[in-house]
Image (tube, rainbow, N blue to C red):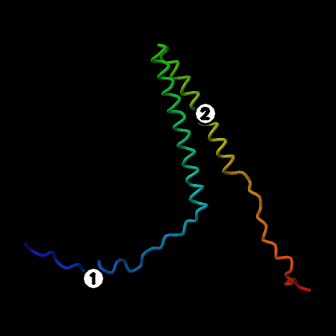
Amino acid sequence: MRKPPPMPDVLKDGPSNPSPRPPVDDGTMNQLMRVASIGTNVAFAVIAGSLLGLGVDWLAGTRPWGLLVGAGVGVIGGLVTLIRESRKQFAPRPLERPPRPPSGDDSRPT
């Protein structure tokens, strides 16, 4: 069997100027994940309502009214969830005060 050729030095050292990624703080990532979960919740509410409506149609033989009502209930439930989560996300937050110096500290200017 033949040996593979040696690895070139360029590949051993890696890229000469790797592009650094900008740092992502936890607050930004939390906001992104919350927004993504809101959209997923709306979609699941519509799907769940539609499936329940299909089940009602199958049991009661009321085709297509169960599906339509179930999808409508799912849309309304999804929109209620969307509004609630949006209000939580974009609610004004109280300003943080700087910490107070200890009471025995005489570092104030005179």
Q: Could you say which is closer to the camera, residue 96 or residue 21?
A: 96
Q: Neighbour class for label 1 at 10 Å: few (<14), some, many (≥20)?
A: few
Query: Foreground mark, 2 or 1?
Result: 2
Residue at coordinates 34% horizontally, 77% vertically from top-left? 14
Q: Could you say which is closer to the camera, residue 34 or residue 64?
A: 34
Q: Neighbour class for label 2 at 10 Å: few (<14), some, many (≥20)?
A: some
Q: Is residue 30 above or below residue 59?
A: below
Sequence-wise first label, 2 or 1: 1
From the image, which quarter does the C terminus lie in?
bottom right
Seen from this angle, which residue lies furthest left? 1
Mark 2 to mark 1: distance in Å?
60 Å
Q: Which mark is residue 77?
A: 2
Q: The residue under label 1 is which amino acid type? A: Asp
From the image, which quarter does the N terminus lie in?
bottom left
Seen from this angle, which residue lies furthest right? 110
Residue at coordinates 87% horizontally, 84% vertically from top-left? 106
Discs 2, 1 touching: Cβ within 8 Å? no
Q: Could you say which is closer to the camera, residue 54 or residue 10?
A: 54
Image location of residue 100, percent across then percent down: 81, 72
Residue at coordinates 36% horizontally, 77% vertically from top-left? 15
Q: Is residue 47 above or below residue 88?
A: above
Image location of residue 10, percent across then percent down: 29, 80
Image location of residue 64, percent across then percent down: 49, 18
Label 2: which secondary element:
helix
Tell me which corner region of the image, top left, top right, bottom left or bottom right, holds residue 94.
bottom right
**Left or right of 84 on screen, residue 96:** right
Residue at coordinates 45% horizontally, 73% vertically from top-left? 19
Residue identifier under label 1: 9
